[in-house]
Amino acid sequence: EPEVTQTPSHQVTQMGQEVILRCVPISNHLYFYWYRQILGQKVEFLVSFYNNEISEKSEIFDDQFSVERPDGSNFTLKIRSTKLEDSAMYFCASSEAKSRNEQFFGPGTRLTVL
Amino acid sequence: AQKITQTQPGMFVQEKEAVTLDCTYDTSDPSYGLFWYKQPSSGEMIFLIYQGSYDQQNATEGRYSLNFQKARKSANLVISASQLGDSAMYFCAMREMDGIQGAQKLVFGQGTRLTINP
């Protein structure tokens, strides 16, 4: 069964460093998303992406964040200068172009900012 | 603005019993979808069940069913014959359709931690 994959599973970084979180969505999906979950809290939407551009972004997704689909398979989230409060689990999700649009989530990347 | 409320931070149930996890939502959009996800301690998000606002019947997927009461704006998850492996965090989520296909965000509730006791 096809699945969304994410690398790395855990990333530790120093405050102020840039990180890139990588995702490979399901191959025939057209819509891509990033969510984050701070430990013990609910899952929050960050950004959605379709047709090589951002469809919607939340107020969390400020100028420090960017997304890219550098090739036909990867979808990346970059945080330019990490802050302590960026420590969270980051989930990538994808969906296909059908009315139900069930979103399939990857296993997540746990980002720890020291 | 969308809002999802899960009022039960924790639930404890005996194995083999049925359990109902509550979810209420608030939206002004007539067209929306409701989802339930399971998050075990390993952290991944596992899709369980979906209910569309225009669906005439309550959704069912194996031991999972969704008690959809549109007038009350509730979408409770019912797990029948609970198993030890059902112990996890459960999130209710909603997506408004607003006539646009595709990339629409999910808004999640705070979650309910379900513990199944042997």
Image (cartoon, rainbow, N blue to C red):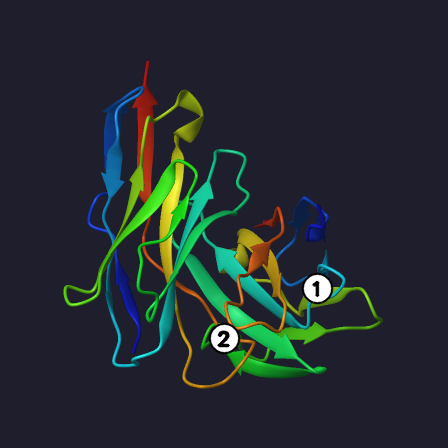
Tell which tag, 1 or 2, sits nearer the viewer. 2
Distance between mark 1 and mark 2 Cα atoms: 28 Å
Instruction: Report x, y in % for residue A47.
Output: 55, 73
On screen, residue B49 versus residue B81, left or right, reads right
For residue B6, side relative to residue B32 (left or right): left
Q: Tell me whether the residue at label 1 lies in contact with that at label 2, contact meaning CB atoms closer than 8 angstroms.
A: no
Q: Nearer the viewer, residue B102 or A70?
A: B102
Q: Is residue B41 left or right of residue B29?
A: right
Reading the image, the residue beneath label 1 is A18
Vertical position of residue A85 compared to residue B9: above or below: below
Q: Is residue B40 left or right of residue B67?
A: right
What amino acid type should be assigned to the residue bearing mark 2? Gln
Looking at the rendered structure, the secondary structure element under dot 1 is: loop
Which image quadrant is residue B44 in? top right
Q: Which mark is residue B104?
A: 2
Q: Quadrant of the C terminus of chain B?
A: top left
The residue depicted at 50 percent of the width and 75 percent of the height is: B104
Please say if A47 is above or below A83. Answer: below
Which picture quadrant has residue B62?
top left
Which residue: 72% across, 82% down?
A52
| Residue A93 higher or lower than B87, as above or below | below
What's the residue at 67%, 70% (across, down)? A80
Residue B21: quadrant of the picture: top left
Name, please, the residue furthest toward the front: B56
Q: Specify the farthest residue to the top.
A: B118
Seen from this angle, which residue lies furthest left?
A: B72
Determine the residue positioned at 65% across, 79% down.
A50
Measured from the top left, where is residue A32 in percent x and y?
63, 69
- Examine the rendered structure and indicate whether residue A98 appears above or below residue B29: above
> Where residue A45 appears, x then y in whole percent?
48, 67
Subunit that carries the residue with mark 1: A
Q: Amino acid at mark 1?
A: Glu
